């Protein structure tokens, strides 16, 4: 398979991800900026391998569950769910809000776990598949603030501030303003996003490390989010304190996660032998 063919497959997967209904061929071709003939050939090949399915009634295309199954298999191989879920559940119980954890992959953050703590009133239940926009989210700013200014500037300059989806009315859209915000995050030791990722919502986030001590590398971020009305400024510090307790627990558990994965692999090899 050529590089171009791989690129077409990945673009189609990204275009279909999150679609609740099958998408027509012509619409897909327009989204990925390819001729309908090339789009059809690629979809046919993906269908033959079980990555997409074609609806017999509408003839539209949708992702199969194979990608989701592989994603869960990958998370399980990393021992992520069993390690982090208990920590998130306790954080959600303490804060009575929606809590999420993202792990760092290269220069991106990816959601991997969540827990809902709101039991009454408004509930915030965002899509776990959404992109984490670094400059517009508490999680993104919490991670960027762990970098020195030159590195943060490089990443933000390379990415720019344009996004494929609308953001909130208070999103910071200039480099100098965001760098000043990151300095505030470093001083406070937590990041906030007040109607930045989306209107009517707020979040507080901090990074967590892959081991105890400030010399351990950053593994990801954890956050508490919910309706703006429940996130007055005077509550931010208390939420940050709860996040710091969870982050300390994660830092203790993260090396055990890696050990557990290695231990399983050794046990499996022993059984095979």
Image (tube, rainbow, N blue to C red):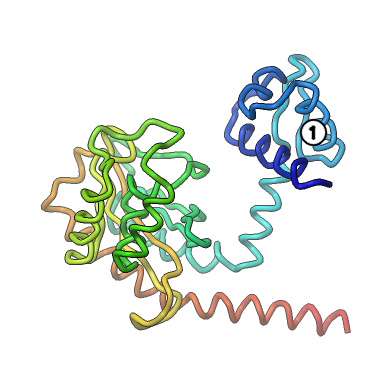
What percent of the width, then of the height, locates residue 135?
34, 48
Q: How many marks?
A: 1
What percent of the width, then of the height, locates residue 239?
23, 58
| Left or right: 236 in relation to 270 | left
Q: Is residue 164 above or below residue 104?
A: above
Q: Which structural element holds mark 1? A: helix
Say which residue appears at 77% left-offset and 14% top-offset. 57
Q: Which residue is mark 1?
A: 42
Question: Based on the displayed image, in which of its 4 quarters is residue 186 positioned?
Answer: bottom left
Q: Is residue 192 visible?
A: yes
Question: Based on the displayed image, in which of its 4 quarters is residue 62 positioned?
Answer: top right
What percent of the width, then of the height, locates residue 205?
31, 57
Say which residue appears at 51% left-offset and 55% top-offset. 112
Q: Is residue 219 above or below residue 14?
A: below
Q: Is residue 22 visible?
A: no
Q: Is residue 191 above or below residue 195?
A: below
Question: Based on the displayed image, in which of its 4 quarters is residue 29 positioned?
Answer: top right
Say which residue appears at 39% left-offset and 44% top-offset. 160
| Left or right: 71 in relation to 40 | left
Q: Residue furthest left?
A: 234
Tell me the crowding category of disc 1: few under 14, some 14 to 19, or many 20 or more residues within 10 angstroms, Cα based.
Answer: some
Q: Is residue 68 above or below residue 191?
A: above
Q: Residue furthest top?
A: 57
Say which residue appears at 59% left-offset and 29% top-offset. 19
| Left or right: 174 in relation to 210 | left
């Amino acid at each position: 398979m050529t590089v171009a063919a791989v690129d077409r497959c990945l673009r189609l997967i990204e275009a279909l991800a999150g679609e609740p209904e099958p998408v027509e061929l012509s619409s897909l071709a327009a989204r990925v900026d390819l001729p309908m003939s090339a789009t059809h050939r690629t979809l046919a090949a993906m269908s033959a391998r079980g990555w997409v399915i074609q609806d017999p009634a509408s003839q539209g295309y949708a992702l199969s569950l194979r990608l989701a199954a592989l994603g869960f298999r990958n998370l399980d191989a990393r021992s992520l769910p069993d390690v982090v879920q208990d920590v998130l559940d306790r954080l959600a119980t303490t804060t009575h809000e929606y809590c999420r954890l993202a792990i760092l992959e290269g220069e991106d953050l990816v959601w991997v776990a969540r827990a809902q703590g709101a039991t009454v009133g408004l509930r915030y239940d965002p899509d776990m598949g959404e992109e984490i926009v670094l400059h517009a989210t508490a999680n993104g700013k919490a991670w960027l603030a762990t970098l020195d200014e030159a590195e943060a500037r490089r990443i933000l300059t390379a990415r720019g501030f344009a996004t494929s989806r609308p953001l909130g009315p208070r999103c910071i859209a200039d480099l100098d303003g965001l760098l000043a915000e990151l300095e505030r995050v470093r001083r406070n030791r937590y990041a906030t996003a007040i109607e930045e990722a989306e209107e009517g919502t707020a979040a507080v986030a901090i990074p967590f490390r892959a081991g105890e001590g400030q010399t351990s590398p950053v593994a990801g971020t954890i956050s508490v989010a919910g309706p703006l009305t429940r996130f007055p400024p005077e509550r931010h510090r208390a939420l940050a304190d709860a996040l710091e307790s969870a982050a300390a627990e994660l830092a203790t558990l993260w090396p055990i996660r890696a050990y557990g994965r290695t231990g399983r692999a050794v046990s499996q090899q022993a059984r095979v032998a």
